[in-house]
Structure formats: structure tokens, C-alpha cells
Amino acid sequence: MSTSDKTLETSKKGKAPKSIASTQSLSSFVKAICDVMRRSNCASALQYVPELTWILFLRILDAQEHKAREEAEALGNDYSAALTAPYRWQDWAAPFVADTLSEGKPIGWKRKELFEAGDGKLFEFINNELLPHLHSLDVDLITQLPNVNASRKQRVIGRIMTAVEKVRVDSETNLRDILDKVHEIHIDHIDDTHFFTLSQVYEDLLLKMGEKNSDGGQFFTPREVIRGMVHVLDPQAGETVYDPCCGTGGFLAVAFEHISRNLGNAPAATILDALKHDTFFGREKENLVFPIALANLILHGIDQPNLWHGNTLTNRPTYGGLFEQAPPTFDVILTNPPFGGKEGSDAQKNYSFETGSTQVLFLQHILAELKAPLDGKAGGRCGIVLDEGLLFRNNESAFVETKRKLVDECDLWCIVSLPGGVFSTAGAGVKTNLLFFTKGKKTERIWYYDLSQVKIGKKSPMTLAHFGFDKQGGVLADADLPRTLTGDWFEQEDNQGKPFPSFARLRTKHGTPDADSDFSWTIGFAARRAKAQADMLPFLDAVKNLSEELLPLKEKLKTLKKDKADKGKVAIVEEAIKAKEKAIREAQTKAADIDASVYDLKAVNPHIKAISDTRTVLEIIDTINLQGQVVATAMNNLRGLL
């Protein structure tokens, strides 16, 4: 008896979907599905990731629509589903359940009908009926024009499915195995505290690809880091939220959850409609990731993900049909631009400070996209993940000038230094920081918070508690803080009876002396600029004076050459000119170096207590000799045993 036949029998008994309540159990579950795919003509992750994405999307979409229908009927309201029979998961993909009816038909009726019709009929239905129908939700298959009769949600569904031309799985037996396993994933049986269904699946697959050094060159922001950033910016209903390189849509999804939670259980219909349709905007370049982002957002309740497909930096769209309602600027920007990428001249020419460095161009893009202050309202605010190199690099003009623009146009009020292993689970060891800034006011002071001492790894990832936040964004009690954060702080004599200075506890005090602690400090940026101006002044004066001295020398040289004077006299003046010009260049360089040093924003905790070795040279030698004796004794004991 085939696996499918067994499933048909057991499903009649009302077998409940498995509970998937942890990242580990979901990863194991997905691995089992991928094992089937790998033996089914989907050997590469670049093949089975898209295949799993659209199958999983249709599964959870069906569960969501079923739940929404039940809620609407309970309230006596009409409900118009995006998909109707026989194109719903419950019709063609779900295992047959004779005694469970939906709109008068048993669950899995179409699948049973296709199974009984013979081998190959399931493939025929998917390739020749289901996929063309889903494609037509976005674009009319005859006219190739947008489907004006489709709802916005249907158009998004159609766009998600556009890249799926046919089933990749090579046998119906394997396909039915996959469908049965995916059917066990149920939205009521997934704990979403630590992960999101689609994005976590995708990230898990990328991690496996990265470990094998094959086709997983991307990584995504850990969801707990995203949640911490969202708590800091606290987006509100009525504001627009934007991510210019949205990946699988994590920042937008978390922002939606944050706003929804703060609205309570009974938000006004108009507010909820705006939240689902006119709030979240993003751009994504990768062909593989774009449909996954759409699917992820729509499954999280954002009925209208306003996503633009194309290269943000060149502004060349692959598909811009869902971005038509985007405003020119945004209230909130949350993002993690790619590090280390290189852009060509077609991207660089769009920006004032040209460079191949992707993250520098993205920062310039963000500064242009943030809403300016108006009518007494503060300007747009941003939370961004940036690599350490961008903060301290001063050897390239574009880096310096972009940071100058940042601090001149925005209040860069906070920089958080993250632990080195935050992104290690995604195959990236780049040292990173979080920057928070608000447009419309020059930076006067920068508050730093140092989390770099926290030990993070694959088995001990960064959590919201490391920021000191609870799930709702409140301040965690000291007893609930992780030991990897607090260390021996409470045991130190000076800290007896004091609350732990977590980021969440201190951030509201930034700009005051109370915000400084063993892990945080404040840089007076205006004072730093003023000092640099004072330090530069002697060199600028030297440039001015040397330039004034240079003019008569050049006039004298001109006269000597005109009068065809002795070559020796001409050479003396030429050497004097060269000496003056060299001195000018040196003074200019020293002034420029002082100016550039102002924009070294790297986080270096001044409160770290250096541990020095006070032993004398003879004491160190004695210690080495003692260790040598220990080793020699151990080796002799080993020889005795042999």
C-alpha cells in the first residue's frame, strides 16, 4: 500500500496535525520534506526552496481563509475568499476525509477524484488548471494585461505564483508524500514567538546551503534583533513603514505585529484597513526571495504588501505593479542592507557620493527616503543594521561624506554594538551595529550601548532579553535577564542593590548622565566637531598663508620666463614653488585627516576595565617552568601505563 493510500485511511480517523512548537521541530519537519524533494528531481536548494515555498504558501493560505470564513460567519458577515473550489488546498492537496465537509464537499474530494482517475492526473490538474488559474489572478492570460477583476490580495497571490511554471517533483507518489507532510503544518499548531513560518523555513534552508558553501550566499536578520529594533522605533498606526532591501519581509512583518498588538482587540475598521493595505512598503532585488517575501507578508495578515521587485540602487524595476501607491517618503525605515556588495556605475551615478560599497549607497538612499519634519512634527526615523567597517572607515571620501550627511541632516541618537556572533547562524561573521536616527535635526550627542561582551553562537542565539525587552517591549525584570548578558555584574561590590543597566532600561534616558553605565556612554558630537575645527585651524591658516606666499612666486616665475632669464634663477624659483605647494598639500592632508576623524563612529567602550599582568619577567619564567614539569610528569605517567 502506498504512503498516499495509508494517509487516506488514517485521515478518515481524524488524525490531528502535529504540533510544531519550536524552531528545532520545524527544522526537522522541513528537513523531512526536503529529503523527499531531493529524491524527486529537486536536488539543489535553488530548486526545492521555490517548490516548498509555493506549496507551503497555498497550505497556510487555505487554513487562514478557512479560519477567516468561520469568524465572519460567526458574526453573521459575508466572506469572499481569494481562492474557490477546486483551487483551494482543501480540495486538491489535502488528504481525503470523508466525514469532514467544507461547503458541502469532503476535505480532499478533488485529490481523491484525481487519484482514482489514474496516475498522472494530479500533475495534469496542477500544471494545466491550477497554476494557469493562479497566474491569471495577476495577469489576464489572453491580453497579458493586469487582471482588473481580481482583488488586490488575488493579484498578490498571482504574483507569488508567477515564477512557478510547473511541478518540479518527478513522481506523483513523492508529491503526495510532500503534500501529506505539508498538510500537517497548521497555523493553530505553530508557536510564532521565535520564528515565522515561511521566513524561518527559508532561513533554515539558506543556513544549510551556506554550511555546504553551495548556493546560499545570502543571510537574513535574526528575528529577535528585528523585534528589538521595532520596539525602539515603535511604529504607530497611520505611519508608513519601509524596507529598501526587505529580504523575506521580516522587518515589515514584525512591525505589523507590533502595531496590531498595540491597537488591541477591536481596532476601528478604517484603521485596520489602512494597516493592511497602505502601511507597509518594501523593495527586493532577488528573484528567488521576492515571491517568498510576498507570501510571508500576506500570510502574516498584510493583505496588500506593497513590494517593488528590482534593484533599489539602480531604480530599475523588474516588476513595480504592487508599488504604485507608495508615498515619496516614509515615516519609519527598518532595514539591514547587504554588507560588502559592489555596485556598478549605473547604481553609483544616482547618488551624490559615488562608491561601489552597497551599504554606503543604501544609507544615502535611506536619507533621501526619510520623511522631512513638517508642521511641528518630527521627521522620519530609522533603525538600520550596519557593519563596523562603515562606522570607522575614513580612507574613502564617499564613506566620510555619507556619514557627514547623516549627522548633519539627522539626529543619530544611538549606536548599539552587537556581539560578534549575531549573524554566525547565517554563515556571516561580520561585526555589526544598530544605528537609530531621526531626520530633521543635527546630531548633538550620540549614546552608545555595548552588547559586544555577550557570548552568542549557533546554540545560544541573540534574544530579545539581551536587549532587556519583554515580548511587548516593556523592561524585563533583573531576574529574567539572561546570565550571558549580566555576567558577574551583580556580584561586584559597587553594584549591590542596583538595577542592571540594560539597554531597554537606559534608552529612555539617553542624552542625560543617567544613561551612562558600565555598558553605555555618550559622545558629545557637537563638542567633537568644535574641537576638530579648532585643531584644523592652524593647518587651514597655514594653507591660506602659504597660498598667499605662492602667488608672488608664480608671478616672478612668469616674469623670469618672459624675460628669458638665467636658467639657474628660474630653477631656484621653481624649487621654491614646489616646496610651497608641497607644504600646502601636507597642511591640507592634515586638516582633512582631522576632519575625517570626526566621523569615526566606531563603538569603543571607555568603561572596559583592562586586565594587566603585573608579574615580573622572572615570575613568568618560573610559571613556564612549573607548567613544563606538570607536562613532563603527565608524559611519564602515560609511559608507565603503556
Image (cartoon, grey):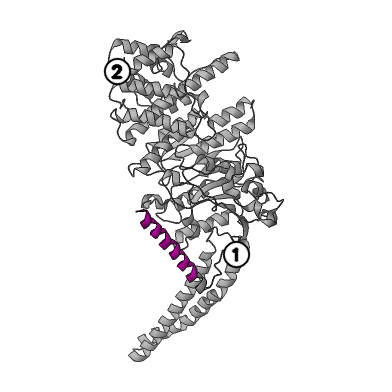
Q: In the visual, does 23 lie left or right of 638?
A: right
Seen at 56% across and 38% down, the residue is 240
Task: Give residue 528's mark.
Answer: 1
**Residue 198 in the image, given as x and y percentages of width and height:** 45, 32
Q: In the visual, does 357 lie left or right of 259?
A: left
Crowding around mark 1 (Cα neighbors within 10 Å: few <14, some 14 to 19, many 20+) is: some
Compared to residue 223, the image places residue 41 above or below, namely: above
Q: Quadrant of residue 180?
A: top left
Q: Secondary structure at mark 1?
A: helix
Taken as a whole, is the magenta stretch helix, strand or loop?
helix
Q: Secondary structure at mark 2?
A: helix
Which quadrant holds the C terminus?
bottom left
Seen at 37% across and 43% down, the residue is 210
Number of numbered discs: 2
- Viewer-closest of 373 and 632: 632
Residue 17 appears in the rendering: yes
- Tag 2: amino acid: Glu
Start-end of magenta stretch: 621-642
First in sequence: mark 1 vs mark 2: 2
**Residue 385 in the image, given as x and y percentages of width and height:** 50, 48
**Residue 356 in the image, given as x and y percentages of width and height:** 39, 54
Which quadrant holds the N terminus?
top left
**Residue 455 in the image, given as x and y percentages of width and height:** 52, 49
- The alpha-carbon separation of the residues under discs 1 and 2 comes to 70 Å
- Viewer-closest of 618 and 12: 618
Q: Mark 2 — residue?
A: 124
Farthest residue, direction front: 640
